[in-house]
Amino acid sequence: MIIMYYNYYHYPANPYMPPFSASMMNYQPPRSYPPVDTKIFSHSIQSFKILMQQGSILLDRLAELQFSKKVMNAAQQGKQAEVDQLIKSIGLKVPVKTTFSPSGVIFELSTNSGTTSPFNCCTLNINMKWGE
């Protein structure tokens, strides 16, 4: 004779949790967004175009062999002030921050904050390798 034990009590699934469905994983409640205002974005675009033009002027000047030798020699000797003066001599209309290492140089061009633009909206980083 075989005796089988049965568990007569049924444990239901969590009654407080709705059944799982894949569509619930990506559910996001509806949100209300403010109306789109492109004024600041449009200003940023125009400012960035200026940065691109100024960056092009910088690259054209750096492409001149004598000028690039002066910049690299000053940087190799750790003369930050001389490098800054050389870059300033180009006559760019935007501020340029120059950082360098034995392997490369970074020129950071940024927009001016002034009366018409109380904040810096944009930055253009030009990262270039000049050594191993």
Image (cartoon, rainbow, N blue to C red):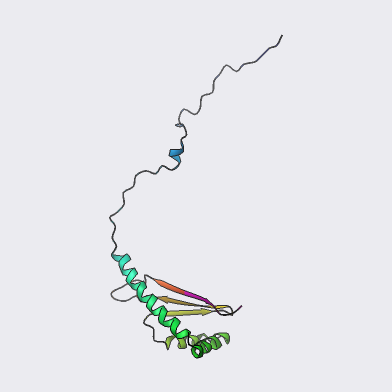
Residue for point 51% across, 79% down: 99
Quarter of the image for residue 40 reads: bottom left
Magenta-colored stretch includes residue 22: no
Quarter of the image for residue 16 reads: top left
Please indicate whether residue 32 sits to the left or right of residue 67 in the image: left
Placement of the N terminus among the 4 image quadrants: top right
Quarter of the image for residue 24 reads: top left
Residue 59: percent from the left, percent from the top?
45, 81
Magenta-colored stretch includes residue 129: yes
Q: Residue furthest top?
A: 1
Residue 85: percent from the left, percent from the top?
46, 88
For the image, the number of numbered tags is 0
From the viewer's perspective, is residue 81 above or below residue 48?
below
Residue 44: percent from the left, percent from the top?
34, 69
Residue for point 51% across, 27% down: 13
From the viewer's perspective, is residue 64 above or below residue 125?
below
Placement of the C terminus among the 4 image quadrants: bottom right
Residue range highlighted in magenta? 126-132
Residue 3: percent from the left, percent from the top?
68, 12
Please indicate whether residue 12 sits to the left or right of residue 116 in the image: right
Residue for point 62% across, 16% down: 6
From the viewer's perspective, is residue 93 above or below residue 23?
below
Residue for point 41% across, 42% down: 27
